[in-house]
Image (spheres, rainbow, N blue to C red):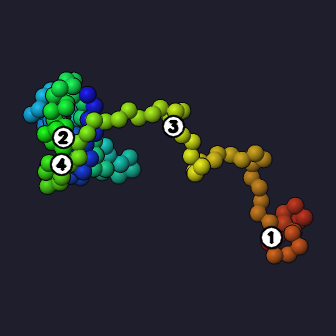
Amino acid sequence: MNIFVSGLNYSMSSEELGEVFSSYGAVASAKVVTDRATGRSRGFGFVEMPSEDEGRAAIAQLDQTDVSGRKINVKEAEERPRSNDRPRSNFGGGGRREGGFKPRFNRDNDGGGYDRGNRY
């Protein structure tokens, strides 16, 4: 069972997260998610427990409890959709436009610009 944990103290390590859950059963893996650029914790993580029953008991017992001075939220992790199943966004990306680079024109004079030899 894969478990999502949020509200973690930013100083908590993956090993410490695993130790918190190990008192409720076997822990296959524990991972605190970190920022790629800074390496700093993002305040959430995932714990994988082989037993469904132990995982559900850990969720019930640890949700909304104080761990390292912070109240944590614990729930069953939802499956992340594959990249080609995600809805398309109208923002960001874009990539190359057809035609490549397009110069900006000076709109203050009569529509001149690079195509007429006028430099602005």
Q: Is residue 78 above or below residue 110?
A: above
Question: What kind of element bears circle 3?
Answer: loop
Question: What kind of element bears circle 4?
Answer: loop
Residue at the farthest bottom position:
108
Foreground: disc 4 or disc 2: 4
Q: At 19% from the left edge and 32% from the top edge, which residue is drawn? A: 56
Q: At 63% from the left edge and 47% from the top edge, which residue is drawn? A: 94
Question: What kind of element bears circle 1?
Answer: loop
Residue at the farthest left position:
23
Badge 4: residue crowd in 10 Å (few <14, some 14–19, many ≥20): some
**Where does the C terminus fall, quadrant-wise?**
bottom right
Question: What kind of element bears circle 2?
Answer: helix
Residue type at mark 2?
Leu
- Left or right for 76, reference 116: left
Q: Which mark, by number, is residue 64?
A: 4
Residue 17 x %, y %? 18, 40
Q: Which mark, by number, is residue 119?
A: none
Residue 55 x %, y %? 19, 30
Residue type at mark 1?
Asn
Q: Earlier in the sequence, mark 4 or mark 2?
A: 2
The reply to whether dot 3 and dot 2 touch (C-beta < 8 Å) is no
The answer to which image quadrant residue 45 occupies is top left
Foreground: disc 3 or disc 1: 3
Residue that label 3 marks: 86
The reply to whether dot 3 and dot 1 touch (C-beta < 8 Å) is no
Q: Which mark, by number, is residue 106?
A: 1
Q: Earlier in the sequence, mark 3 or mark 4?
A: 4
Q: Earlier in the sequence, mark 3 or mark 2?
A: 2
Residue that label 2 marks: 17
